Structures are given as structure tokens and as C-alpha cells.
Amino acid sequence: MKKNKRLTGILATAALLLLIPFLTDAPWSLFDFILAGVVLFGAGLAFELILRTVKKFEHRIALSAVALAALLLVWIELAVGLFGTRFAGN
């Protein structure tokens, strides 16, 4: 039961984060919201997978840091094009 509560909390947090640009009238298209949802929910599910499968605390911290860094790098690339890929924003 505890695992399901944690997953629900993670997904609810991702949904609340996705509401911020919606409520502030950010100039996002429907595709932007869908892509942001995929990135946020994917990161949330990655964290849940790490927490469910990795038993050693130090490994959990390290893998969670890697997942967080990946989330931030993808988000930054999609927003401003830090690396100049074809997925870069304007």
C-alpha cells in the first residue's frame, strides 16, 4: 500500500507542475503540454522504479541524481536549446 501512495504522490506532483504553465497562460501549444507531461511523468516513473528496485541507499541516491540530471538536461534542451539539437526550443 505504501508503494502505491508514493507513486500516486509522484504522479500528482508531476501533474501539479504541469498545471503551472497552464494557469499562468504560458505560450505553449498542445504539443508542448503533451511533451512536458511525457517528460515529467517519465521522470516520476523512473524515480519510482529506482525506489522499488534498488535496495542499497547509496545506489538509490546516485541513480536518483542521475535521473534528476537527465530530467533537467532534457527540460533545458527542450526549452532553450542548450546543446543545439533538432529538438531545441526557441
Image: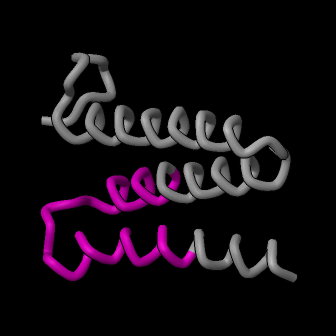
x and y, in percent, of residue 62 in the image: 59, 34
- Indicate whether 16 appears above or below 65: below
Q: How is the image coloured?
A: one colour
Residue at the image position 48 percent from the left and 74 percent from the top: 13
Q: Is residue 78 above or below residue 55?
A: above
Magenta portion: prevailing SS class: helix
75 and 30: which is toward the camera: 75
Residue 89 quadrant: top left
| Vertical position of residue 2 compared to residue 47: above or below | below
Residue at point 81%, 79% (across, down): 2
Name the image quarter holding the C terminus.
Answer: top left
Q: In the image, 67: left or right of 59?
A: left
* Number of numbered callouts drawn: 0
Q: Quadrant of the N terminus?
A: bottom right
21 vs 85: above or below: below
Observer-nearest residue: 8 or 87?
8
Instruction: Compare residues 1 and 87 and report the one nearer the observer.
Output: 1
Magenta part of the chain: 12-38
Viewer-closest of 68 and 87: 68
Q: Please give the name of the residue rendered at 33% of the width and 42% of the height, measured from the top-left corner.
A: 75
Q: Position of residue 28 (x, y in %)?
A: 22, 60
Indicate left or right for 57 with 71 as reference. Answer: right
Where is residue 51? Give x, y as percent: 74, 53
Left/right placement of residue 1 relative to residue 90 reads: right
Residue 35 inside the magenta-drawn segment:
yes
- Please tell me whether residue 48 belongs to the stretch shown in magenta: no
